[in-house]
Amino acid sequence: MASKEEESREAAGEPAVAVELLEALHRISARYCLEEGGSHGPDHSERVFHTAMSIGDKMGARLDIIAPAALLHDIGRKQESSSKGKVCHAELGAEMAEPILRDLGYSTADRITICHCIHAHRFRSSISPKTREAKILFDADKLDSIGAIGIGRAFLFAGQIGARLHNAELDPAHTETYSTEDTAYREFQVKMSKVREQMLTPLGRQIAERRHAFMETFFSELHREIYGSE
């Protein structure tokens, strides 16, 4: 029989797992994400965790799979940033997560399932999400890249790499990532504007539509203010 504490966690949308295990996952996630910081710091993984758990709860998914997948999905980010994008953080993150999950006592089958979620969560990943839990993590991660949060993170990342404020006059095809032209608006053109089309769950699509509309309004206003077309 579940304890009152476990019932409380389930009611809050958290998995029926030991408190110690969940706390360990949060600590491990924070340690790796602090190394990256900025737009992919611990707050990002925590938001993805809560969004994925909320969607997963409504869809009847395995929250005990979603929780570790969401909290560990970006542990390979530091290496991708250091390589300026040459390393795929999703693929590397899945490799890094396997021994972590083994040490935490996850079964072989669950490790494979969780690592698939991590490997398949990236927008530009070489593999696509195959399971319900992987699709939910994919959507939760992408939702954190759009809307007001997405805009804030895009500017934060641009500041991290020394990009300028706005470059609406440039074709993104003629600019490079991790350069002075890798602006928030370029991110909107290349990635953020396409997110709503990439959603894999009904709930994800619903949330994405609202957030997309806000981004359109924001960047239109930014363009008017910068180029004096009031």
Image (cartoon, grey):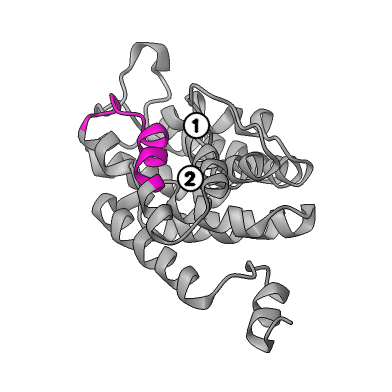
**Mark 2 residue type:** Ile
What percent of the width, then of the height, locates residue 170? 39, 17
Residue closer to the observer: 174 or 50: 50
Q: Indicate which disc, 2 or 1, sits on the residue closer to the N terminus.
A: 2
Q: Write down the residue under mark 2.
A: 151
Q: Is residue 196 left or right of residue 86?
A: right
Please name the residue shown 49% across and 41% down the image. Answer: 115
What percent of the width, then of the height, locates residue 4? 68, 88
Please say if the residues under marks 2 and 1 sit with CB atoms less than 8 Å apart: yes
Residue closer to the observer: 118 or 83: 118
Please name the residue shown 68% across and 60% down the image. Answer: 54
**Mark 1 residue type:** Phe
The single residue placed furthest to the bottom in the displayed view is 4
Residue 97 lies within the magenta run: yes
Q: Which residues are magenta?
A: 83-98
Q: Is residue 171 visible?
A: no
Q: Write down the residue under mark 1.
A: 188
* Helix, strand or loop at mark 2: helix
Q: Is residue 221 visible?
A: yes
Q: How far is the residue under mark 2 from the one under mark 1?
A: 8 Å
**Total marks placed:** 2
Q: Is residue 107 above or below residue 27?
A: above
* Helix, strand or loop at mark 1: helix
Q: Main secondary structure of the magenta part?
A: helix
Residue 23 lies within the magenta run: no
